[in-house]
Amino acid sequence: MRLTTKGRYAVTALLDLSLYQSGKKFISISQIASRQTMPVSYLEQLFRNLRRAGIVESARGPGGGYRLSRPSTEINVSEVVASVEDKMDATQCGGATDCNSGKRCLTHDLWTELNEQVDSFLLNKSLQDVIKNKRTSLSRKQEGLIVTG
């Protein structure tokens, strides 16, 4: 199973978008690229897929860019990854059960179960969940830095 740069960048870019868009405001790809140190041209490709999948909306011209099409609580990480990645699959055969010279290999069911666990995990994580976890993590780190007399 591989999660490529496409999936990682798409999730990161949408987290950035959800943090920086306020109300109906659009955010430019160049702003996201700058904050997250990602190539603009790569993000443009990803955002085309994200728009086709209905995850983001776009506007052209001054003040244009992208925004989430619905609240970050309603967008799960699985749909973001699926919109830019080929199917993530830990099996050698792509789920076709012909992994060992046309027969099911000994570990096929193990890798199939792993796929199901990963899918379930990502389906149950919204963009807002990831942001909330990050904020909680940052708060804990900051609390640990406080020096008491």
Image (cartoon, rainbow, N blue to C red):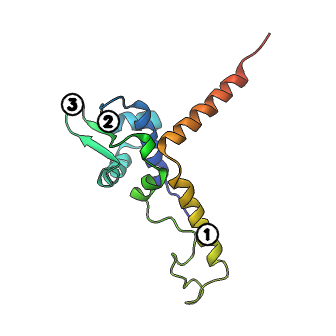
Residue type, numbered disc 1: Glu
Task: Determine the secondary structure under disc 2.
Answer: loop
Above or below 11: residue 92 = below
- Binning the other alpha carbons within 10 Å of mark 1 as few (below 14), some (14 to 19) or many (20 upward) gives few
Dot 3 or dot 2: first in sequence order is: 2
CA gap, disc 1 to disc 2?
39 Å
**Residue 118 seen by the camera:** yes
What residue is at 57 percent from the left and 60 percent from the top? 118
The mark lying in front, picked from 1 and 2, is 1
Name the residue beneath numbered marker 3: 62
CA gap, disc 3 to disc 1?
48 Å
Name the residue beneath numbered marker 1: 113
**Residue 13 seen by the camera:** no
What residue is at 37 percent from the left and 33 percent from the top? 31
Judged from this view, the residue extending furthest toward the left is 61
What residue is at 72 percent from the left and 18 percent from the top? 146
Can you give x and y, in whole percent of width and height, for residue 144 in the image? 72, 25
Residue type, numbered disc 3: Pro
The numbered mark at residue 122 is none
Can you give x and y, in whole percent of width and height, for residue 27 in the image? 33, 34
| Callout 1–callout 2 Cβ contact below 8 Å | no
| Callout 3–callout 2 Cβ contact below 8 Å | no
On screen, residue 90 versus residue 48, left or right, reads: right
What residue is at 33 percent from the left and 29 percent from the top? 23
Query: Which image quadrant is residue 134 in?
Result: top right
Query: Which image quadrant is residue 18 in?
Result: top left
* Quadrant housing the N terminus: bottom right
Dot 3 or dot 1: first in sequence order is: 3
Task: Determine the secondary structure under disc 3.
Answer: loop
Name the residue beneath numbered marker 2: 28
